[in-house]
Structure formats: C-alpha cells, structure tokens
Image (tube, rainbow, N blue to C red):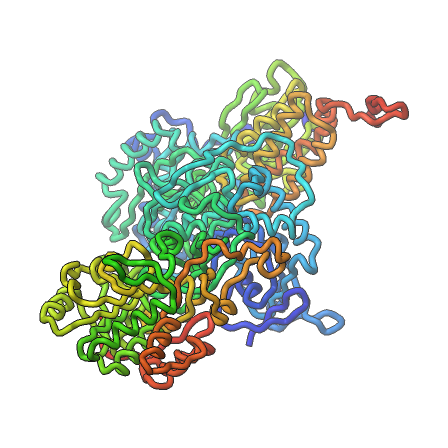
Amino acid sequence: MPKVTIDGNVIEYEGREKLLQLCLDDGVELPHFCYHPSMSVPANCRQCLVEVGMPVKNRETGALEVDENGDPVIRFFPKLQTGCSMDVSDGMVVKTHRTSDLVKRAQKDNLEFLLVNHPLDCPICDQAGHCPLQIQAYKYGPEGSRFEFRKVKKPKRVKLGPRVMLDAERCINCTRCVRFTDEISKSHQLTIIARGVKNYPMTPPGMEFDDPYSMNTTDICPVGALTPANTRFQARQWEMAPTPSITTTNAKGANCFYWTRDNLIMKITPRQNLQVNEYWLPDEDRLVLDQFNNNRPEGPQVRADGGLQASTWDAATAAAADLLDAVDGSEILFVGSAYATVEDNYLLTKLASALGAATPVYLSHVETGHGDDWLRTDDRTPNTQGCERLGLTRTDAATLQAQLEEGAIKLVYVLEDDLVASGLAAGALDGVSVILHHYNTTNATLPAADVALPAAMVVETVGTFVSEDGHAQRVRPAKAIKGINRTLMMETGKSRTDMHGTPFDRWHNESHQVDCQPSWETLPAIAALLGHPMSYKGPKQIMAEVAANHDAFAGATYDAMGLEGVRLEEIGEAV
Amino acid sequence: MEATNPTSKAGDWRNYKRVLLPPVKDLHQLEVYEDNGGYKALRDVLSGDKWDPQSVTAEVKKSNLRGRGGACFPTGLKWTFMPPVDPDVPRFLCCNGDESEPGTFKDRQLMEYNPHLLFEGILIANYAMTIKTCYLYVRGEYAQWIEQMEAELEKLYKKGYVGENIMGTGFSTDIVIHKGAGAYICGEETSLMESLEGKRAYPRIKPPFPAQKGIWGYPTTINNVETLACVPLIINNGADWYSGIGAEKHPGPVLYGISGHVNKPGVYEYPSGMLITDLIYEVAGGMRGGKKLKAVVPGGSSVPIMKADMIDGVTMDVDTIREAGSMMGTAGMLVMDEDTDMVSFLRRITHFYHHESCGQCTPCREGTGWLENLVTRIDRGEGNLRDLDLLIDLCDQMEGRTVCALADAAAWPVRWTVTRFREEFEAKCKPAVFPTGDGATEAAVPAT
C-alpha cells in the first residue's frame, strides 16, 4: 500500500485522499475551518498549511535518489501547502506544526489575521464553548494581537430567513454555508456579497433563506455568524447536556443530539451517521422543542364524577386493569402507535394476545407530498416500519370509526396516539371505555379518556425505532422524569457540570421533571394486575426478546445497535 | 541622468519601425487593416500546405515569445500544455483583456488602435490549438472600445473570417467578447474563468491548471492581449525575425506604458531590452521640470520598486531586471521624481490592494486592510517606528500563503518600498521615546 510520512510517522492509505482528511482519519489534528468532508474544497481559510515534500526521482532512470545514509532525498515545495487541497501520493513527507516551526508560525499568523476583524464577543456568543475559532485560537493562535485599528463594521443582526440569523462581523468567510446551499441542499440561496474584508454571506436580493435544511448552516458555521433563530441566546453550550438519540418528526430516523438544561430540551442538533443522515438534519426536526417542554401532563388521571381527576400511578393502573377486566378480550380494540417504540408496541401486542384480543392496529400518519428524496419523508411518524415488522395492522381513522360504529367494541386502548386529532369523530368514542397513553395535554382524545396514563416521550425513554429504510436505532433519555427508574437514570446524557461539578452546582436537577412513565413500565404493571405477569428488567431485555422471536428484527439487540443502529433485513412492502 | 553603462539590448531602437501599433490612420477598421496586409497570416496558415497546428505552435515556441501579462511565461510552451485533441471535449482560448494593474494601460491601445491584429492572433492561436471558441474578456471600463471591437467583429463574421468555414477552408471558430464588471481580481486567470462562468470571481486552486480544467472544466489556454497580437507577426515574418528583436531571452516588440513624472507619458512600442534610462530620458522626454529621478516601478504597481541608483544599465527584459531586484511585469512603468512622498505613494498602492482583494483567503483579506491602516497611520505622522517592522512582518505572513498571487502583489510594494526607502518612513513616524530615570520620557536620538 502507498505510504505517507507525517511528522515521522508512516501512514498507509488507499485510493485518492486529501492530506487533511487522511490526517483527521488518522487522529493527527490539523487546525482548519473551511474544509468539510462532504463538500468541495475551496482552501480559503489557509489554516491547514503544512510543509509537503516529495522524494526526488532521477529523471533518466526514474529511480529514487538517496543520500549518503541511503534515505530517499526529499524535496520540499517552496511554499507551504494547504492540507485540505493536497492529494496525497506515495512517498510524500509532511511536516505539521508538531515538527515544523514554519508551519507553527504560519498557523499562528493566520489566526492573528482571522481575529483582526472578528468582534471577539465570545462572552455573549452562542458559539462560545464549541467554537472552532475559539478553540483553535487558544490552541494555535498568538498570545495577543498587534492590530490597533478600528475593526470593520458589518451588519450584526440580519434575519437571513425565518430560521437563521446572521452576525456578519463574526463571519470568517469560510463559505461553508454557501457551499452547503450550492452542493448539499441545492437551494442556491446564499452567496458571498461585497468584496475583500467587507465580505459576508447573504441571500440574493428578494430571496429569503427558507431552505428546509437552512439550519444546518448554523451547525457547520465555524464561528457564531449563523445562529438558529429559535434558540439563540437561550443557553450556553457548557450548561447543556447532549444526549445521542434520533429525531421522530419523520420516518427517516435522522441521528441527533438532544441538548438539555434543567430538564428542558434547549436545542436539537445533527449527529453524524453516514448510513442515515450523514451530517445533516432538516429544520422541521429541530423545531419540535415545544412538544417536549410544554403542555406535558401532570401525572395520571382517572374519570370520576364526570371528569378526569388527578390520580396516583397505582390507582390509575388499577383502574385501567379493572376496565380491561370488565370486558371480554374480543371487545377490546388495542391501538398501537407508530410514534411509540418497538418495545412499547411489542408489550401491547403481548397484552392483547394475553387477553385474547385481536392484534393491535396502528394509525398511519402519511402526509403525501411532504417528503423529499433526502431527509424528509411523507410518513410523519418514526416507527411505521417497527409496527409493520411487529405485525400490527395498519388502519386509518375512517376504518376505525366504522369498526366502532358496529358496536362490538367496548373498550379502546390507545398507546401514544391521538385518535380524534387523526380524524376520528369525537362522538364515536361515546359509550366506549378509553384507556389512553398520551404525551401532551393537547391530545384531542384526552377528553374522551377514562384512564389517562402520561407516557414518556422520545427524549425521556429508552427504546428502539425502525426507520423507513429498515434502520433500527436506539433512543436514550435526554431528560429525567419524576418517576425513578434505574435504566433511565443510567442512560441519561450528562453535561460537564453533571459529570465534573459539585453536587451543589448540578444543572441536572429536579425542576421541570414530567410526571409520566415509559409505556414499557406502565403496560407490565397493568398486565400484572390482570394476572399476566411480564417480568422484564428493562427495554434492553424486551428488545432482546423481540430480536429473538421476530425474524424481522433479527440482530437488533441494544449492543448491536450501539450509537449508529443496525440495518435490518428487508421485509415485504411497507407504507 | 544619463546611463553610464549604455548596454541597451534593444539595438538600433531609434530607427525601430512599429509593428504592433503601426502609424496607420484608422487601422482599427477592417478595410484599412486588410489594405495594410492584414489577415495575410491567417490566410497563409489556413490555406496551403505550409502550416498545420503543430508547425504554428512550433513556430511560436521557436520565436521565444513570452507572455506579456506579467509573468513572462513562454507562450509556445503554454500552448503545448493543452491535452491532445478529443472531438468530444470542448476546449477554449481565453484572451485576457482585463487590464487593471495600476500603471498598466497598453492592451487598451491595442484594442483601440489595432484590434484586428488581436483578432488575427486569436484565430491563429485557435487554429494552432484546434479550439472552437475564444472568449475575449475585456475590462468593462473599456466600453467604448468594446463597442468598436464588437462592430469590427461583426464585419469579420459577415466576411467569413470568423465563424463557420473560415475563408472556405473548413476551419471554424468563434470569438465572444465578454465585458468585465470591474474587479482587479478578474485579471487573475482562474478568477477570470470563474467570472466568465457567471460566478463570483474567486481564484481557483492550482493544480488543476487551466490547460487541464479551465472554463466549465474544459481545457483552456489563457493569453494576454499583447501576447496574442504578436502571433500574426511571427507567422508573417518568421520566428527568427521575431527572436531577433530586442533582448535575446525575452525578444519581441514591447508596449512600454510610461506614466508619472515624465514629460511625455504614454504607451511606446519599442524592442524589449530597452534601457530604463533610455525609456525615461529619451522616449518619455525626460523628467518633468528637470527634476531628479527618485524611483521607478518598472512593471505595474505590484513589482518591487527600484531606487534611482538601481536602474543604471538595467534593461527591460525578464532576466536583467530580476537581477537588478525587480520584475518585468507588464512593462507599465511608474516614474517618480524627487518630490514624491514615498509614504503617500505606498498609502495609495495599499489602498488599491485593500479595495481589490477578493476576500477569499484569510491572509490577503485581512492583511491588505491592515497594511493600509498601518501605512495610513504613518502617512498621517501618527505611526510608530515599530510599525515598520510590523509591515515587513505582515508581508511575511501574506506572501505565498494564498490561493492566487494577489497577496504577493499587495505585499511586494510594501516590503520593497519600506525596505528601500526606510529612512523616509522613519522620518514620518513619531519619534521613539524611552523612559528616563525620573519617570518622564524623552525622544530617542536617531541612530546615525
């Protein structure tokens, strides 16, 4: 295999590669700003300059020339070369800042230049704490600046589009955002305007930056120039705890981090998974903070005296068990959910079969025309594939309504869905008992419920979702719920202060904890009361059972899924 | 000041007969140009057996014609960089008429007074490299001559000298005139291509070079206006005739654009290898008001400035002038007399590069502005002596670290003006102060 020598270490590589990428893959850190692995290479930040040399070949014989020690003679390029644009070739010798004072000096010089017109408003900048410019300036930059003049004035608060704000003074003109709209999202909505030191990105006249993927530019911006309009100035980076999970806005299963502070979801950012969403996340996936934080139920409720009354978990599960016990299995309609995890739906099917009820159905939430051929799908639920693979029967509101009007159904058990909002006439549930696992108090089926059992949402539970492409992925709890559950506690993402702070300054505290329960805890509790014990230690064990019993989930154990998920075998046509 | 070492390489330049800009009235009109033997070279090349593409290229190579855009790269060699002809792959010639280096105004004369020589050169070059399209990228401010050239080009199309089946020989090629929008950076060959493609004129990384990946990713050769205008002359008179003009290693007629404090500024056509002293004192009529010469910038504003005592015996050809400590550049010569304030001069130059930096690369974008800030401060008398070292330091930080050569072009004038006229800069700076024992400060005594 061809080899390159970087700072004296020999590295083997295959195929065509850029030097910077090779260094990054090999764990050799090289400072850089404009380079992004999925986009073209403009080499404009000039930060990754390195010394590059090639072995000298004899012009006539083509043999490598050697010096008196028998080592190949290396001729270095007269100028420093940018690693990002340099194709590696066999025998190349590279000196980075670790071995070359020239490179060290060049990196320092470049950072001095970058900071000349940068406002240095880190104390109020959302990017501070995870800012490549800040980090690299501390690490490789000069101790101070020799610049003694007025900095260039540029627009500070530009609303580029509905979701992205620009602070042009912070911009270092890496053009990542422009290249993103040109090469990745192909909306061509950004360009660099003006010239020289007055440069900054802007939309063409009369156009607004409403690309459905616009907020990705705020992630790839190496400074705080582009910030998300919905979360700017809300929380400092180091106050929040990131939890690796996936988004549930659609059936793509895009990987993300949920950032939490005080048990509130503060922002959602993409997490790299080259099999699913690469580095990106659609805007719609990030704008769902509200449903996690607001209108959450305060504990279970049971119908009494003509209205829903607050109850305790024990009383509510007992009430649900009583309702289920009062009717024959054939009179119960179990409604699973494509919003719920595989584990929850699996337990529901187990309960249904234990009670002798029909296989649960699930409502499909397809919005034709919503998807594109990238990260948005027509299906607005995260787990349609999971339901299909579990053998749940797909249905729609009209069919459900017809079924209920026949009158044979006496009890409807709804797992984490909203029948009324999905099109079922509210009157159809009159005279029918309803047990409801719900996320939000805005659930339109709630007024018809006899027992309402708040369910943990994706940001509070552990579970598995299967994407449209058959990719099974785990979710992890990003915030704590009121109930104490060891599994959840062990998996919750932690912030720096959670991990390293004192007990007195932990941000991860008891405020904003929702009184809800994961359905995989509620369902076994009800089942146990009905004489059908389901003894599971946790969702890991449930999923292991699913993987063992269903061919469609073969291999999808928690250990196998890890952070990047598992691609399941194809099954027949779904959705 | 007369040259004490008059070893001009231009031969008998006083009797030189102009060939690029011959003294013919209305030569810009096709009829007049043809009456004076125009398009003979093209006709010879296209018809008859004497020429084929290879032999035209070989002739240009043999003539030792060097590019006139500033880098003085051998033109024939550049043409051979084009990949072998593939009928499925378009290839382009691009003629760079985006003349915007301060002190350079020679291409304008050609486009104004002898555009057909340029067209003929383009057509021959297209034939030599089997190219179907040439883009003539002209500086937008030359609107008047663009209109004139467009009218003349129209005549050529009507006459069948450009377009399909030229002169009935089966060779077809087009010329497209493109008007620039007024940025210095568009004169850089790769950003010129970006600009032609309708994009923002950010220079491209090389390699790939234009001959591999040029306009729209296809093989492209880029030549200066004056370079291409020399091609018909070489075909008509032979490579030996051409290489016999002027300096041996850098032959041919050169359009010297002389500006500044001389009695007769203007564009003068003479052989290469002219003594700088001859150009100033003979050709341009000497220094204005009989003043003493102070400095010369021999090839457009970005080349290193030369002090008056450096030009003795220096001739205008690439090697000699490099040895003397400057560069040939575009042969646009800025002449300054003894009254010139070098700090003020440099302030104007740095302002230009600050204004024209495209802003793609960090060192140039931020460095050019910083240079201007520093020089302006010194010019105002508010500078510190340490600023001079900082200026040189910034030049070190900019040179050779950017995609294109604009950072170099911006840094050289600063580096060389500050180095070669340092005492003038020091004189404008605030005097250095150092603390005395009793807590006060006093001005340092200038080092003698």
Q: Nearer the viewer, residue A125 or B447?
A: A125
Task: For the C terminus of chain A, give its image quadrant.
Answer: bottom left
Query: Where on the picture, by quarter, is residue B354?
Result: top right
Q: Residue at x 37, y 75 (%)?
A: A525
Q: Residue at x 44, y 56 (%)?
A: A269
Q: Residue A298, position in %: x, y? A: 38, 57
* Whether residue A423 can be seen here: yes
Q: Residue at x 61, y 28 (%)?
A: B346
Q: Is residue B120 left or right of residue B312?
A: left
Q: Residue A549, position in %: x, y? A: 34, 86
Q: Nearer the viewer, residue A217 or B314?
A: A217
Q: Nearer the viewer, residue B49 or B131?
A: B131
Q: Nearer the viewer, residue A500 or B217?
A: A500
Q: Residue at x 25, y 46 (%)?
A: B163
Q: Residue A116, position in %: x, y? A: 59, 38
Is A268 placed above or below B366 here?
Answer: below
Looking at the image, the residue that sits furthest to the front is A305
Q: Is residue A418 left or right of residue A209?
A: left
Q: Residue B130, position in %: x, y? A: 34, 54
Is A117 placed above or below B205 here?
Answer: above
Task: For the N terminus of chain A, give its image quadrant.
Answer: bottom right
Looking at the image, the residue that sits furthest to the left is A406
Is A297 placed above or below B283 here?
Answer: below
Query: Where on the picture, by quarter, is residue A532?
Result: bottom left
* Whether residue A271 can be seen here: no
Looking at the image, the residue that sits furthest to the right is B437
Label tally: 0
